[in-house]
Amino acid sequence: MTTGFEEATPSLLRPRGVPETIAWRGGADGRLTILDQTLLPHAVRHVVCDTAEQVWEAIRSLRVRGAPLIGVAAAYGLCLGVRPRRDAARGALLADVRRVAEYLSSARPTAVNLLWALRRVQARAEQEPGAGCEVWRAMLAEAHAILHEDALACRRIGEHGAGLVPEGGGVLTHCNAGALATAGYGTALALLYVAHERGRRFRVFADETRPLLQGARLTAFELSAAGIDTTVLCDGAAAALLASGRVQMVVVGADRIAANGDTANKIGTYAVALAARAHGVPFYVAAPRSTFDPQAPTGAEIPIEQRDAREVREVAGGVVAAPGAGCFNPAFDVTPAGLVDGIVTEAGVLKPVTAANIAKFLAEQDLQRSA
Ligand code: MRU
């Protein structure tokens, strides 16, 4: 059974100072270790998952979060979910794989990386001609490959996009699309890590990202740990900051990119994109192949997660909304492709953002994988 470096991200592919987000430890009888991001920045604690149900709960509750990382977690969750029956006949095991994949896909609806990773592991299971235990071994190898490829893709995104980071300027980001959201350097924040490594000086502005504060809790935590100058602002201050001339670039991650480039990302991203366009500041999205959904022709076909009203009604456990008020709590919004100046991928910067450029990128990536 595979052991060693494939099970966790090699340290060269993670920024220094940022805790490991996910790792499979222990070979065939191993366990999945996940950083509990609900506790950050106050505590760095890992939870251990032995079942698909535990992985489902970790995804739903945002202990593990960020589109690429959700995909990696789900891939391992599928392996855990069918492991108790890995000695069953091949047909019975494959039926189980379908059932557990369906279950895990219900954890969160918007990040397509979840479905993408589950389909990959399922396809690998179906292609493996051997007995149940060999099918299961192939599934685990595929989950390791997904983790490793995500870390490599993040590094490449950083290298392709680092040149866009303005020397001596300001960069605004929303939510957390960093090392904490992936198995590697992150997507949007990978540009900043690589630019920082190359000696570029710049300041990052991180929207706090209500209601769950991924910007204040996570982006500020990981950028500060890596020694990058970071300032947190309320989401409502972003337009004024862009108007002030202190920001020369906006970069965000994505949860799903439709075939035409419409981009779903954390709620509030659309408002930032509108304000950036109004003030002539370039707005970039950074995302790997696993975040593109060619089955969704436009953003209108992307399912948007609606979360519990308590996330809006309460702050740090205390009720802040007036009694009787309703709550609107979509976790994501869609930024139209026309507001996106470029998409930084592991293969380079897609610019202009058109359906044709996206289709070409997807065809090349899928060809490379099948080669
Ligand atoms: O609800 P979350 O914290 O999972 O939302 C995360 C985001 O919106 C990120 O920007 C996106 O997943 C890209 S992460 C590289």
Image: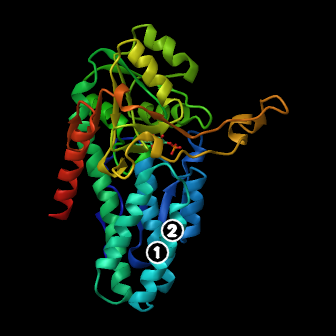
- Disc sitting over residue 98 in the figure: 1
> Mark 1 and mark 2: span between their CA atoms?
6 Å
Which amino acid type is shown beneath numbered disc 1? Arg
Neighbours of disc 1 within 10 Å: few (<14), some (14-19), many (20+): some
Which of 330 and 165 lies nearest the eye of the viewer? 330
Identify the residue shown where x is 29% and y is 20%.
201
Mark 2 element type = helix
What colour-coding does the image apply? rainbow
Which of 296 and 122 lies nearest the eye of the viewer? 296
Q: Looking at the image, can residue 234 be seen?
A: no
Which amino acid type is shown beneath numbered disc 2? Glu
Q: Quadrant of the N terminus?
A: bottom left
In the picture, residue 297 is in which quadrant?
top left
Q: Quadrant of the C terminus?
A: bottom left
Residue 223 percent coordinates (x, y): 42, 32
Identify the residue shown where x is 30% and y is 88%.
130
Identify the residue shown where x is 45% and y is 91%.
88
Farthest-out residue, right: 323
Q: Looking at the image, can residue 299 be seen?
A: yes
Which of 73 and 310 lies nearest the eye of the viewer? 310
Q: Is residue 41 above or below residue 115?
A: above
> Pointers 1 and 2 in contact (CB under 8 A)?
yes
63 vs 300, left or right, is right
Identify the residue shown where x is 40% and y is 38%.
263
Farthest-out residue, top: 244
- Disc sitting over residue 167 in the figure: none
Residue 183 percent coordinates (x, y): 37, 51
Mark 1 element type = helix
Neighbours of disc 2 within 10 Å: few (<14), some (14-19), many (20+): some
- Disc sitting over residue 102 in the figure: 2
